[in-house]
Image (cartoon, rainbow, N blue to C red):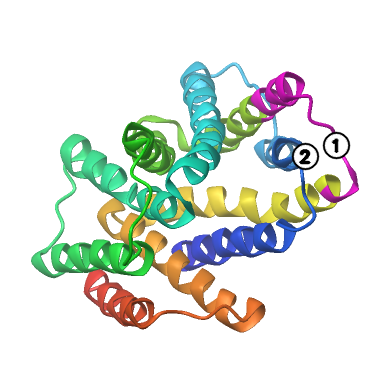
Amino acid sequence: MGYLLLTILFSSLVSVVLRFSGQRVKNDFAMLAVNYLICGVISAFSAGEIFPRVPGMARAGAMGAVNGFIFLTSFALLKSSIQRSGVVLSSAFMKLGLLVSVTVSVVFFHETPSFMQGLGFVLALAAIVLMNFPTGDTKSGFRLGLILLLLLGGGGDAMSKIYEELGVPELTGQFLLVTFLSAFTLCIIWMQVKKQHLGKWELIYGIAIAAPNFLSSRCLLGALGSLPAVIVYPVYSVGSILVVTLAGVLLFRERLEKRQWIGIAVVLAALVLLNV
């Protein structure tokens, strides 16, 4: 449970730092490039021998490359979706990606939740919808993009479970190293295409999110190694929503609607049921 709580903490910290960066960072991919480069360096130090010639290394590298691609494309798709469908609807579909993670665990790795955990899972989804979906009219375009956003958002978390099941535990550091380096490479390519440049604030905030970003990924793998994925993913998702929501109220003086406060109460109930 310790790894899971740390995953929620570090993931939420990344969101809080990104919230602070909103007014200053103009070139998002430049900031992400700095972040992924530092995460790659940290991974290299934690991995020991960077690319050992041992069984499973090729598999770890291939899975890491796929994971890095998912990391970056989901972010790019999120930005595009926000422009077309709005930030609230896009964020809701991103969070609903936990459907993919849990489905992969149940279908392919035969993890079966108890009745109470299943009820908690349903409540978690209800809370996500309640807290994120708007009550009024929303833009209706780009529905395919929203579905892809859900699939990619969940696919990134699902890759951690897939590696935990199919990868070599001793090569977790190498898996993360390739993940971050492939995401960094894609960032550089995208910066060249979009003619983005690295400025002072991109550098500062890229450094600021690097450590919690790396620790969030590392602790998620640790949580999946000690707890069933049907518990980890819903708790991770709704727990992060809860922490970020409270941070928004306390740090940024954001006001919540009544339905969002109800959603927080549902989140707490879901967390209790998921741990029964």
Residue at screen point 52% across, 31% down: 73
Q: Which label's residue is closer to the chain start, 1 or 2?
A: 2
Q: How many marks?
A: 2
Q: Which residues are magenta?
A: 184-201
Residue 154 coordinates in the image, percent (x, y): 37, 42
**Amino acid type, label 2:** Val
The residue shown at (60%, 83%) is 250
| Pointers 1 and 2 in contact (C-beta within 8 Å) | yes
Residue at 76 percent of width and 56 percent of height: 208
User: Is residue 6 on the magenta stretch?
Assistant: no
| Label 1 CA crowd tier, 10 Å (few <14, some 14–19, many 20+) | some
Q: In which quadrant is the N terminus drawn?
A: bottom left
Q: Residue furthest left?
A: 115
> Which residue is under mark 1?
198
In the image, residue 104 lies at what x, y percent? 25, 39
Label ID, residue 34: 2
Q: Residue at x 36, y 69 (%)?
A: 131
